[in-house]
Amino acid sequence: MRLEKTGRLAVLATILFAASLFTQQGESQAQAQVGGMSPALQAAATMFIPLPNSTLFTPDLVQQVQQLHTKDRWRLPEAKAWKSVAEDPYVVTRRLDEMWHTVGPWESKYKLINKYRGRISRLQELNPDVDFDNLQEGQQILVWKRSEEGVSRSLGTANRGRLVNGEPLPPGETYKIQYPHRAFGTYYAVSETVRVLDEFGERFPDAHPLLVGDMSFRIGRKIAPHKSHQSGRDVDITLPRKTPPPDYRRFHHLRYKDIDLEQTFWLVKQFVDSGHVEYIFLDKRWQRRLRNYAEEQGAPQEWLDKVFEYRSSRPGLAMIRHERGHHRHIHVRYRCQETDRRCS
């Protein structure tokens, strides 16, 4: 995906570099012209290749790079089908093959069944040597194992659906999972969430870990207190903060001075650009700040209207929408894929 995004930029950068090598003008003229460029044009050129003193970059060519960069950076959201190999979904991010649960104080087999929406017979099959009538605190129980029966599927709607062969979100260094038993999703929802959060850590190595809240139960269906999160295509993620939260047990209140606007905008834009996200639900007060930030970064009006419901000329078509209760986190809903059934 990263190669697709930068391919056209690399082509034009190569053209610029070739033009500089074969120019017939002298070094002094080149230096004079380069020195006469505006800082914006110089930045556009040096964004992709070095700018030696003996290289001639005409303003027209550099302007083309700048325009192409702007077009690529602010390209309109576009739905993409998940990549597949031989008709099987192709997932390159981290995935779990097994999920283990550490028995807590006074935890019984009935609590395990309720948490992981399974049957005692299945737990016994996965743990043949465990006496489930006498569980001990700290004991490790295998509660999920990847099935070879097929990929996970989202059935029905996010508000009235279920999840087949759901897989758990794996742990990560850049995020913490609030409730692992409520963090199951489709293969693409889990994969895209992992990809974005891992890249967030690479882009902002000093950022505080994010908190991932609910996705779905292992089999989907109703998950209180949500109206949605029933079919494995939804995930809640806290907004990046300038200072660490008091703890990672819940989504904490955010004041204007708490939010890291640069990190938040980067995170949201990664989901927007992916092509796999249908909606992002976020309180309009944060939409306002993010939209203003995007405007300062040079986002065109068409992109702003397509992405933000706030101040959009066509709010019904916007991707990021206001929803009550989403002032402490973003709620990402992924698009249906061909592997899903009756999905909408």
Image (cartoon, helix red, strand yellow):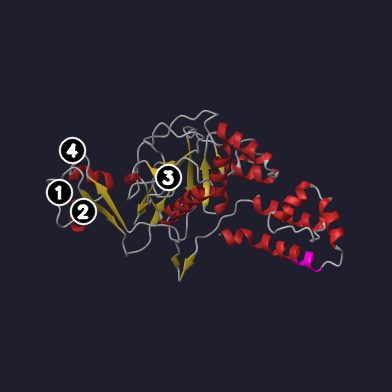
Q: Percent from the top left, x then y, of residue 19?
A: 79, 65
User: Which residue is label 2 attached to?
Assistant: 123
Q: Percent from the top left, x then y, of residue 322?
A: 54, 36
Q: Residues within 10 Å of mark 1 (few under 14, many from 20)?
A: some
Mark sitting earlier along the chain (3/1): 1
Q: Label 4 amino acid?
A: Trp
User: Which residue is label 3 attached to?
Assistant: 175
Mark sitting earlier along the chain (3/4): 4
Residue placed most toward the observer, 62 or 337: 62
Q: Label 3 amino acid?
A: Tyr
Q: Is the Cβ of the residue at disc 1 closer than 8 Å to that at disc 2?
A: yes
Mark sitting earlier along the chain (2/3): 2
Per the rendered image, the range of residues in magenta is: 18-22
Q: Label 2 amino acid?
A: Leu
Q: Percent from the top left, x then y, of residue 202?
A: 51, 50
User: Which residue is label 4 attached to?
Assistant: 106
Q: CA distance from mark 3 to mark 4?
A: 28 Å
Q: Label 1 amino acid?
A: Phe
Mark sitting earlier along the chain (1/2): 2
Q: Is the Cβ of the residue at disc 2 closer than 8 Å to that at disc 4?
A: no
User: Which residue is label 1 attached to?
Assistant: 132
Residue at left offset 27%, top offset 44%: 115
